[in-house]
């Protein structure tokens, strides 16, 4: 169907259009300006009015603009075009507009569905409701703050409008839309943390009438229930709680809503990667020879260079489509936030907001050209030092720039002074609000976990809503984690200035990412105190049931540790991967191996000069904050994974999918607005992932990339790999090349070699002689844990996993970063 959505520059219009696009309909948006998030493949008409030629032949027109301006023009255009159906939103919280809209439709004589909505709330609203409740106070202009008020969630409005467009059997006329129950303005204000201030009678006439009206008609949802068979997915309390997420970290100043400088609010709109730049430069595919995956990123030729670095620690790839719609979206949101904080301006800032990260061969890459310009925002520091801190060693000869350079300001004194002020503002401001942001996020994830505790008891609609909420929590977790990386890098720059060298402060015993490794040590200690547990763990095949029956103390300790770290596991960000809670046997076998490992002394960390200790304390605090944020984000992924599996089970029961894990080959949004032939989509995407798995993608490229035939010849005796030493110590041992699915193969005393590791690998550090990874940097999660526990570790050792073979004898120097091949 061809469906025209008006008011498509607002949150409601964007949401409706996104659902229709997911359902594979031909959508045309109309609005005063094209939203940054509008896909390049979907038509958008920039206009303040309505043209019958645009509407001509449309199967449906959905009027999502929530004010009465230009309504007559729209109705005239609809009357002059061959439009199949018309649906109009009538917002009763703006009574004057609602009356004008309904009167205008009645006068036109057109057959239309009028959707009367209560006060629309939700975590993505960006209209007058957000302005009203994000103010320093909520004004009670007429003394009605305690009068009953009906609300509805934006997602329910979107669903009703999509139904209005697609279901020809729905009756024309008015339908009232509101959640069950009621609230008050005062209750909403309390939920978002704003006081209600009454206005004395003589001053009320001076208050702007643009604020939310207080006298509204009661909405009778009988027709919604009986004729439409529609039940809202959010009740009143849930809608208010969700709306509080939109208000958090924001403040209304005048007629606009601004981000509070020391807070990190939720991202309301993420730019589309396939839309042309404002100056008309169109993005182009980077993969050659049919190597582009469905979710790969087209690139701006002026910013051509990308590198697989710390991001691959997050999601090694080729990732599943469900991960593409969660983690990839999160890294893009993080790029947007970083660009807004560093503010390089112009085409550079726009590129940072769109493609700080890219996807190629369904693997994550960082934009190193963008990183180059980002490094130039750090004042009085060699940009190459900043780049190496983020990306490690880059490929020799890699072309950072395309044929045409983007317009940038010269790096003169004025720009460096301005950059210094911006840099200081980021460092001080975000540090000041960091703990509050973390605390709020911890609470958000806890509430999600509580709501998802019994997924089989959830209604279908509530299950899908929790999946969407879980996805958005993960996206925000990436924003918070990336902001911490920015802060850690900033403190690293200051530490370098004060110390004259790179100094990484100790994070201390409170490091959350060390909990998994600490859990193995604690369980090993518990087994040593329990002879029965030690005997059972020493057997070739460990019987978990026998452990539970014969060693109840150890079993209870295991249960406690799984409650703490069960959400973690190798490849923990990939939706398809199992965690320790899914496979407790993996953790038990790791404890068994740790029992035979040689105890390792805790490291003596380098002393920080007195002049830098205050900064070191702040840096260590930010490292801990970062790891808490990452841990809670992974916890949200774990909850989301469980919800997705329940959704998959229901879809298998309904005959829509063939297996539960097929759900991971669908985008999260496709679960709520399902395109036709889901089984066919899953089959195609599974085949694509198998094909991409066979590709050997480059570690870095400029402009375009081609898959290579293989990793190259194996390293020979005497050859030396040069990486980055992130945790000192020199050891010799046999190589064990592992990935997420084979971590169980690592034996005590072997050297763990991997393409990349994440925190889920770290329990194996308890018995690994050393750790070597191809990718990563000094601030990668595994590097931080290795330093805290004295595990020799080298990252960024290019070709290690590909060209070292299991069983090869090597020597690892965690101080110099050298890995020497001694022989097969």
Image: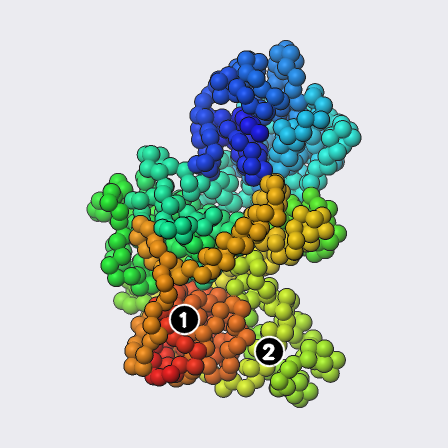
- Residue at horizontal 45%, vertical 26%? 45
**Between residues 121 and 499, which one lies in front from this camera angle?**
121
Depth check: 12 or 803 in front? Answer: 803
As helix, strand or loop, the secondary structure at mark 1 comes to helix
- Quadrant assignment for the C terminus: bottom left
Residue lying at 62% horizontally and 28% vertically, measured from the top left: 165
Measured as percent of width and height from the top left, residue 581 is found at 63, 67
Tell me, for residue 801, which label it has, or none: 1
Q: Position of residue 390 (x, y in %)?
A: 36, 59
| Of callouts 2 and 1, the N-terminal one | 2
The answer to whether 789 appears left or right of 816 in the picture is right
Toward the viewer: 652 or 501? 652
In the displayed structure image, the side of residue 758 where residue 448 appears, left or right: right
Callout 2: SS: helix
Residue 101 is at least partly visible in this image? yes
In the displayed structure, does residue 816 sit left or right of residue 767?
Answer: left
Which of the two marks, 2 or 1, is nearer to us in this view? Answer: 1
Q: Residue at x 65, y 56 (%)?
A: 660
Q: Is residue 784 visible?
A: no
Residue 589: mark: 2
Q: Would residue 495 appear left or right of 600 to someone viewing this image?
A: left
Q: Identify the colour scheme used.
A: rainbow
x and y percent of residue 498 in the render?
A: 30, 64
Q: Is residue 303 above or below residue 489?
A: above
Instruction: Determine which quarter of the picture holds residue 168.
Output: top right
Determine which of the numbered discs, if any, sits on residue 351 in the image: none
Q: Position of residue 684 (x, y in %)?
A: 54, 50
Which image quadrant for residue 111?
A: top right
In the rendered image, the quadrant that contains the N terminus is top right
């Amino acid at each position: 169907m061809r469906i025209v959505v008006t008011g498509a520059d607002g949150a409601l219009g964007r949401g409706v259009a996104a659902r229709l696009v997911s359902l594979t309909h031909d959508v045309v948006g109309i609005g005063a300006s094209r939203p940054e998030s509008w896909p390049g493949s979907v038509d958008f008409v920039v206009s303040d009015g309505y043209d019958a030629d645009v509407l001509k032949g449309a199967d449906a027109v959905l009027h999502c603009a929530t004010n009465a301006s230009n309504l007559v023009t729209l109705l005239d255009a609809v009357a002059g075009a061959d439009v199949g159906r018309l649906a109009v939103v009538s917002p009763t919280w703006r009574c004057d507009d609602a009356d004008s809209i309904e009167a205008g439709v009645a006068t036109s004589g057109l057959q239309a569905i009028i959707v009367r909505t209560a006060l629309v709330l939700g975590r993505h609203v960006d209209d007058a409701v957000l302005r009203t409740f994000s103010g320093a106070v909520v004004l009670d202009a007429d003394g009605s703050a305690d009068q009953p008020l009906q609300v509805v969630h934006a997602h329910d409005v979107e669903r009703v409008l999509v139904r209005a467009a697609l279901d020809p059997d729905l009756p024309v006329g008015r339908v009232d839309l509101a959640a069950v129950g009621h609230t008050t303005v005062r209750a909403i204000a309390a939920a978002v943390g704003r006081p209600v201030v009454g206005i004395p009678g003589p001053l009320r006439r001076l208050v702007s009438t643009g604020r939310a009206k207080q006298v509204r008609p009661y909405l009778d949802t009988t027709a919604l229930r009986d004729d439409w068979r529609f039940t809202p997915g959010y009740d009143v309390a849930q809608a208010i709680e969700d709306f509080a997420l939109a208000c958090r970290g924001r403040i209304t100043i005048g007629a606009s809503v601004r981000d509070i400088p020391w807070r990190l609010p939720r991202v309301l709109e993420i730019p589309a990667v396939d839309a042309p730049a404002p100056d008309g430069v169109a993005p182009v595919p980077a993969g050659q020879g049919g190597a582009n995956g469905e979710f790969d990123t087209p690139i701006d030729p002026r910013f051509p260079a990308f590198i697989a670095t710390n991001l691959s620690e997050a999601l090694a790839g080729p990732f599943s489509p469900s991960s593409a719609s969660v983690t990839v979206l999160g890294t893009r949101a993080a790029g947007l936030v970083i660009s807004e904080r560093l503010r390089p301006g112009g085409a550079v800032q726009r590129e940072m907001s769109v493609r700080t990260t890219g996807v190629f061969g369904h693997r994550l890459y960082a934009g190193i050209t963008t990183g180059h310009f980002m490094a130039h925002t750090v004042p009085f520091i060699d940009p190459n030092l900043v780049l190496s801190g983020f990306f490690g060693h880059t490929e020799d000869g890699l072309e950072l720039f395309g044929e045409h350079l983007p317009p940038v300001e010269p790096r003169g004194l004025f720009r460096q002074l301005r950059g210094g002020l911006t840099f200081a503002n980021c460092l001080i401001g975000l540090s000041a609000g960091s703990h509050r942001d973390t605390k709020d996020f911890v609470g958000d994830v806890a509430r999600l976990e509580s709501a998802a505790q019994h997924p089989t008891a959830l209604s279908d609609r509530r299950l899908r809503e929790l999946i969407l909420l879980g996805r958005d929590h993960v996206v925000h977790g990436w924003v918070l984690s990336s902001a911490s990386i920015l802060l850690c890098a900033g403190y690293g720059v200051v530490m370098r200035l004060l110390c004259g060298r790179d100094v990484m402060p100790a994070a201390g015993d409170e490091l959350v990412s060390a909990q998994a490794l600490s859990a193995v040590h604690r369980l090993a200690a518990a087994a040593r105190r329990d002879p029965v547990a030690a005997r059972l763990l020493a057997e070739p095949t460990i019987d978990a049931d026998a452990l539970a029956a014969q060693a109840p103390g150890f079993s209870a300790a295991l249960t406690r540790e799984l409650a703490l770290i069960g959400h973690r596991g190798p490849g923990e960000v990939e939706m398809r991967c199992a965690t320790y809670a899914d496979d407790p046997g993996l953790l038990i076998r790791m404890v068994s191996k740790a029992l035979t490992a040689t105890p390792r002394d805790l490291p003596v960390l380098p002393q920080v000069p007195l002049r830098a200790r205050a900064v070191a304390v702040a840096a260590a605090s930010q490292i801990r904050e970062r790891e808490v944020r990452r841990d809670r984000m992974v916890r949200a992924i774990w909850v989301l994974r469980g919800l997705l599996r329940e959704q998959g089970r229901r879809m298998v029961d309904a005959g829509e999918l063939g297996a539960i894990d097929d759900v991971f080959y669908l985008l999260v949004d496709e679960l709520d607005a399902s395109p036709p032939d889901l089984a066919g989509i899953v089959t195609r995407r599974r085949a694509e992932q198998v094909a991409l798995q066979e590709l050997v993608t480059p570690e870095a490229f400029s402009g375009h990339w081609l898959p290579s035939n293989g990793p190259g010849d194996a390293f020979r005796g005497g050859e030396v790999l040069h990486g980055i030493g992130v945790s000192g110590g020199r050891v010799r041992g046999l190589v064990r090349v592992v990935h997420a699915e084979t971590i169980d193969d690592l034996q005590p005393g072997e050297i763990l070699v991997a393409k990349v590791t994440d925190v889920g690998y770290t329990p194996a550090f308890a018995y690994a002689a050393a750790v070597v990874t191809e990718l990563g940097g000094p601030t990668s999660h595994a590097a931080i844990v290795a330093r805290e526990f004295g595990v020799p570790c080298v990252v960024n050792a290019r070709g290690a996993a590909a060209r070292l073979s299991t069983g090869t004898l090597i020597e690892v120097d965690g101080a110099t970063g050298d890995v020497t091949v001694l022989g097969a």
